[in-house]
Each structure stands twice: as C-alpha cells, then as structure tokens.
Amino acid sequence: MFQRIRYRLLLSYLVVFASLLGIFAIAVRVAFTRSLTEQITDKLAAIGKGAAANVEFEKGRLTIESDFRPQDLIAYHQALQWFDTQGNLITQQGQTVLTLPLLPNNIVQVQTGKIPIQAVTVPIIGSDNGELVGYVRVSQSLEEFDETLQKLDWGLSGGIIITLVLSSIGGILLTRQAMQPIEESFERLKQFTADASHELRSPLMVIKINAELPLEYPEEIGPKDAEKFQAIASATNQMTRLTEDLLLLARTDKVPNQNRDTLNLTSILENLIQLYKPQAEAKQINLKFQLIANLQLIGDSVQLTRLFTNLIENALYYTPSKGVVEIKTSHVGSHLYVNVQDTGVGIAPEHIDKVFERFWRAEESRSYWSGGSGLGLAIAQTIAQNHGGLISVTSQLEIGSCFTARLPTS
C-alpha cells in the first residue's frame, strides 16, 4: 500500500516538475526565437538602408551603384533586389533571392520551402525632392536560424531529461524519508490492532460461555433475565466477529504470501454454495451458479475461502426475499474471474468508491443487515490484492450489484 502511495507521490511530483520545466523551456524558446528574429530583421534593414543610400534617381530612372560584392552576398547567403515604384524588378545581386512579389506594405516577408528565406523591404527616397523613387529588398536564408533553434531544442530537451532523472532520484529518496515515519506509525498501529484483537479473544470467549450457559436452563431464569443474557450473547458474538476480522486484516497486511498452494477454485466455490444454500432457501433467495470445472490457481485456500465467503454473505444479506444471487466463473488469458451478482438494494453511484473502505457502511444499502462491522468487503479486497488480483463492483440502486473478483492463475 505504502509503495503505491510513494509511486503516486513521486509521479505527481515528476508530472508537476516536468510541466514547470516544459513551460520554462517553451518560454525560453519563444523569447529566444523572437530576439533572434528581431536581430535578423534589424541587420537586414541596416543592409537595405545602406543599399538605398547608393541609389540615384536621374531622368526618371534609377542608377544603382552597389558597394556590396556579390561573393560576399553569396558567402552570407544574402541577396539584394531593386524595384521601381510599380514593384517591377530592376536588378538583383546574390543567389538567395526571394521569389515572392514585392509587397511594399509588408516590411518583412518570409518565404517557406526547402530553403526558408526572410526579406526586409526598405523604401528608396530621392535625395533631391524627398519623394519615393523605388524599393530595395534584402533577403537572407534562414537555414542558420533553423540550425540555431534546433541546437536550442536539443539543449533544452537534454537539460529537461537530465533534470528529471536527477529529480527522480532525489524524489525517490525524499518520498522514502517522508513516508518512513508514516509507515512506522502504521506498522505500530497494525501491531497494536493484532495484539489487542488477540488478547480480546479469550475474555470475549469467557463472556460468551457465561452468557449462553443460563440460556440452556431457561426454567431457572425469568423471561426478562433471558432477554438480557441473549443481548449479552449477541453483543459478544458481534465483538468476537469484529476482533477476528481485525486480526485477519492485520495478518494479511503483514504476511501476504504465506501458505501458497495449487488450488481448485471450482471446488472452493462449490463447497461454499452447498454451505449457504440452506440460508438462501430460508430467505427464499434463488442461489444460482455457473461454474467452469477444475479452475486451477495458486493461493491460500483459507484466505480465498474467506474472500468468497464475504462476497456470498454480502450478496445474501443485501438481497431481499424472492431475489436472485448468481455466481459465475470465467477464464480469460492468465486470469480467473468470479462474478457474484445479486438483485439487492444496490449501491448509490457516489458510494461505489467507498464500498471497500474499512468500517464504511451506507445506511440505505445495509438497512436489513444488523451485525455487520463494515470489514467484509475490505477483507475480501485485501485478500484479492495479496494474491495479485482485484475486486471491482458495478451497481444500480433497486436493481442490484455485481462484484467481480479477478485472480491470476499463477
């Protein structure tokens, strides 16, 4: 149980920490990408302004005198394009040119494809009259930009993975230290429960014997005294059942893997059906069964008998007269399934998750069972888990419930 709690705590811690790291990594990437994009844009704009300053407008035509060497533009994966005011290409330098049409209103243009390209358009203003005489567009390949982002992604991913690995190791140590005092307290509580239950058995047995002895001679005691002794005997029986349940829980929690043998589950269920058949007939309940012959599994016969005893008693107690209790078995893969279905009062949806809690009892669903401690289903679930299995339940109010025990064959 505590191991599952440790795993859940560790998993929750890692999920929260990984989410924070992921948010941090995304924020870093977004900020870095924006900053790098702005740097490229500013650099291209500066080149464009330099190229525009060397353009002269004479007799209605642009005279271009570029100070940029073509080999330099090629080396830096850049290109220059000059346009007139109508957007017609006049000339260009470099190889990394943008093929998109000129859009003067869009200062920055990005062309996607095999080689992504970013371009910045700068207007050319005539030096004489200050009027617009053309445009110069500077473009640059984004391959280096993408490579830089890829390196950043690898760095962030590697950092997150290493951080999570180190955090997992630290989380394991921290959760173990945090859970150790709780485990020790729980173990002491279980030991106290086992010791107290064991010590209570003897005095309860004495009380039971002394309470039942006068009832064997009713002529020597009056009716009122007989009722008192009967109440004492009944209360003693309930206390004895409770101490036995507590002792069983303490033992099964502490030693889950004892007395394991190859068992015939079909035989165990057949014996229990024969045992509870008179009780079902007395209550006018139709006890039906569909059992597969010779279902084999490895387990503790005493504990498994107690498991299915509790499920069958549960179904009989909660099913009113004229109802039906049906027991079915099936074999799927490496697991055996036993369904105990009844037509009882059912369980409310909000109580489904609580039925296996210790000492939990719902008033409506247990209205006609006097004497239960609320430990029967908790004991059954503990035994199933100690055998590597699980008990699940489906139920509808006023229709009935179905408890399914799943047990591994080995």
Image (cartoon, rainbow, N blue to C red):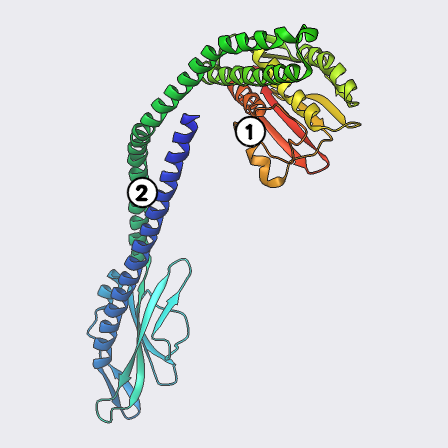
Frontmost residue, 329 versus 410: 329
In the picture, the disc for residue 78 is: none
Amino acid on which the number 1 mark rests in the picture: Phe
Q: Quadrant of residue 54?
A: bottom left
In this rendering, is residue 297 above or below 67? above
Q: Secondary structure at mark 2?
A: helix
In the picture, the disc for residue 160 is: 2
Quarter of the figure that contains the C terminus? top right
In this rendering, is residue 341 above or below 31? above
Mark 1 or mark 2: whose residue is earlier in sequence: 2
In the picture, the disc for residue 356 is: 1
Q: Residue at x 54, y 25 (%)?
A: 378
The image shows residue 103 at horizontal and vertical percentages of 39, 77
Q: Quadrant of residue 209?
A: top right
Q: Is residue 332 visible?
A: no
Tell me the crowding category of disc 2: few under 14, some 14 to 19, or many 20 or more residues within 10 angstroms, Cα based: some
Instruction: Give the total of numbered labels.
Output: 2
Frontmost residue, 139 versus 242: 242
In this rendering, is residue 320 above or below 68? above
Frontmost residue, 195 versus 19: 195
Amino acid on which the number 2 mark rests in the picture: Ile
Q: Residue at x 21, y 76 (%)?
A: 50
Task: Give left or right: position of 368 versus 253.
Answer: right
Tell me the crowding category of disc 1: few under 14, some 14 to 19, or many 20 or more residues within 10 angstroms, Cα based: many
The image shows residue 337 at horizontal and vertical percentages of 65, 22
